[in-house]
Image: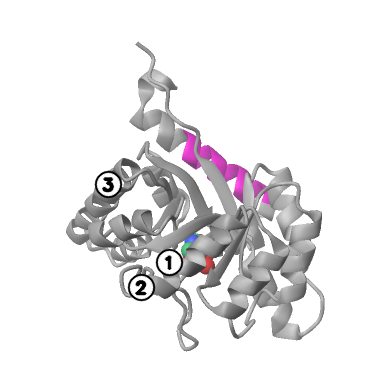
Amino acid sequence: MTRIVPPLRLGVNIDHVATVRNARGGALPDPVRAAQLACAAGADGITAHLREDRRHIRDADMRRLRETLLVPLNFEMAATEEMVALALELRPHACCLVPERREERTTEGGLDVIGGGIDLARKVERLAKAGIRVSLFVAPDEDQIARAADIGAAVIELHTGAWCDLLTEGKATEAATEFGRLVEAAGQGTRFGLEIHAGHGLDYRTAETIAGVTEVRELNIGHFLIGEAIFDGLEAAVRRMREAMAHGRAVAHPAAA
Ligand code: PXP
């Protein structure tokens, strides 16, 4: 019998096009143009993180993305009143709530959904009531995932950063353990009724591997793709990423390929 394996979407994060733009303070390179190219090459959605310090994406970028994109926009943001108000005004397809510390270089850990208490629950509820699909960026931790389901999130995005870092450091055993936690968390989240996404630090190889986890429905990838775009062009990098994902899915489920 042929198994039906759910498709795997690719969300391209264009934050670091804005990082390069901001290095010179002008208008180029334009992250919205990058978003359009990524879509032309097969991205299913675009992700942008409006940080509190506006170090890359700015409010005007979010507005232009919202006005011009024909694919879903995933608005990555801290769970602050300022960002919730902006999301309620912009009404993106999805909001991914992440922890944010001004001094960090990138999102370091998963969101403390339990510690967020009633305040986080109310923010999730307000966004969801406005028709926005709410995703919580979490470490592969069952208690956090259970709480995400309890407070009404539709999606969890599993933090793949620790796994990718361990692989980069050549710590194969620890990496295998962390990957096992991600696989287990994907199963737990699905059983709690959540849609499973994954992201952070992914490259062609790790995206291919995690594509083999059937419960994962979307990968959000930025830094690596924008880096590869310097050498191969953004469209080629996005196409190659799609191929890696398709290959990972097919190898893990040969009957469904
Ligand atoms: N998903 C989330 C929630 C993130 O915070 C980030 C980083 O902005 C990404 C995905 C993309 O990570 P990377 O840029 O390492 O691919």
Residue type at mark 3: give it.
Gln
Q: Position of residue 69 (x, y in %)?
A: 76, 52
Report if residue 50 is visible in the image: no
Please, what is the three-letter code of the amino acid marked with disc 2?
Gly
- Residue at label 3? 188
Which class describes the residues within 10 Å of circle 1: few (<14), some (14-19), or many (20+)? some
Q: Name which residue lies at 77% across and 73% down.
A: 60
Quarter-of-image position of residue 42? top right
Tell me the element at label 3: helix
* Rendered-image quadrant of the N terminus: top left
Quote the CA–CA distance across marks 1 and 3.
Answer: 20 Å
- Sequence-wise, the earlier of marks 3 and 2 is 2
Identify which amino acid the numbered label 1 is placed on: Ala
Which residues lie in the magenta part?
Answer: 235-246
Q: Position of residue 10 (x, y in %)?
A: 56, 46
Circle nearer the N terminus (1, 3): 1
